[in-house]
Image (tube, grey):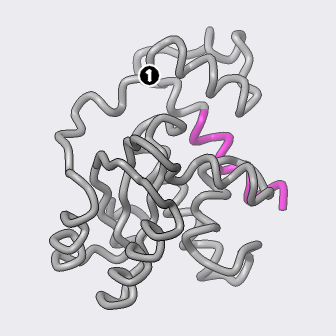
Amino acid sequence: MGTEGTNCAIRAARCDIGDKTEFLGRIREIAQRNTLRIVCFNADMMAGRRHAEAAIRLAARSFGTGTCISNTLEMEALLYAAGSRQCHVAASFGPHTGDNRLWICCYPEHGEAWRELEALVQFQNDDAWDLIDAEKQNALMRHFAITPEECDTLDAENTFADLVVERVALLQIMR
C-alpha cells in the first residue's frame, strides 16, 4: 500500500475455515510473533483492494491521532471497511466459517509473516478480485446507501469503488 506513510501489504487469499475462533487465534499468534497487525477482510464484501487499503489507512490514522472507537487496529479497520460504528456489522466484513476469499493485510509489511500465513491460506493471483459484478454492486449499494443516481455520475476516471471508499472515509466524520 505505502500511501500516507502506511507500510502495509495486501494480498488475496482463499481458505476454508472450520473454526473461526481457532483461525483468528492462529492469525493473532502469527501477528504477535512478527510484531505486526494482520487484518483479514471478506473480499466478497469489499469493493476491491482500494477498499481494503482505505480501511487500513484510516484505521491506522485514527489510532495515531487517538480518535479510534475500538480497542484494536483490526476491529477499527473492519469498522471502516463496513462504514459503520457497530461491531456486529463490521464482523461481516471479516472472515467467516466455510470457504473464504480474503484480502489479507500485514501492517507493517513483514516477509516472515507471509510465509507463516501460507500454512493457513492459499495466496491467489488477485487480478480479477477488483472486479465488481452487478450482484456485488447491488449489495454494496444497499449496504453503503449508494443511489443509482450517484452511479450515473461515474465516468472512466471515477469508479464504483471510489463511491465505496468515499463512504468508508465518511465514518471518520460521523464520529
Instruction: Indicate left or right for 153 with 36 as reference.
Output: right
Residue positioned most to the front: 18
Instruction: Indicate left or right for 65 with 53 as reference.
Output: right
Q: Quadrant of residue 140?
A: top right
Amino acid identity at mark 1 = Ile
Residue at 33% across, 81% down: 30
Q: Which residues are magenta?
A: 164-175
Residue at 44% across, 22% down: 132
Instruction: Indicate left or right for 95 with 99 as reference.
Output: right
Q: Where does label 1 land, which residue?
A: 132
As drawn, 69 above or below 152:
below
Given residues 64 and 38, the one toward you in this image is 38
**Residue 42 in the image, given as x and y percentages of width and height:** 48, 45
Residue 32 located within the stretch drawn in magenta: no
Given residues 155 and 21, the one toward you in this image is 21
Residue 171 located within the stretch drawn in magenta: yes
Given residues 49 and 24, the one toward you in this image is 24
* Quarter of the image where the N terminus is located: bottom left
* Secondary structure under the numbered disc 1 in the rendered image: loop
* Quarter of the image where the C terminus is located: bottom right
Q: Residues within 10 Å of mark 1 (few under 14, many from 20)?
A: some
Tell me which secondary structure the magenta stretch mostly adopts: helix
**Residue 66 in the image, given as x and y percentages of width and height:** 70, 83
As drawn, 86 above or below 16:
below
**Residue 83 in the image, given as x and y percentages of width and height:** 70, 48
**Residue 110 in the image, given as x and y percentages of width and height:** 23, 77
Given residues 96 and 57, the one toward you in this image is 96
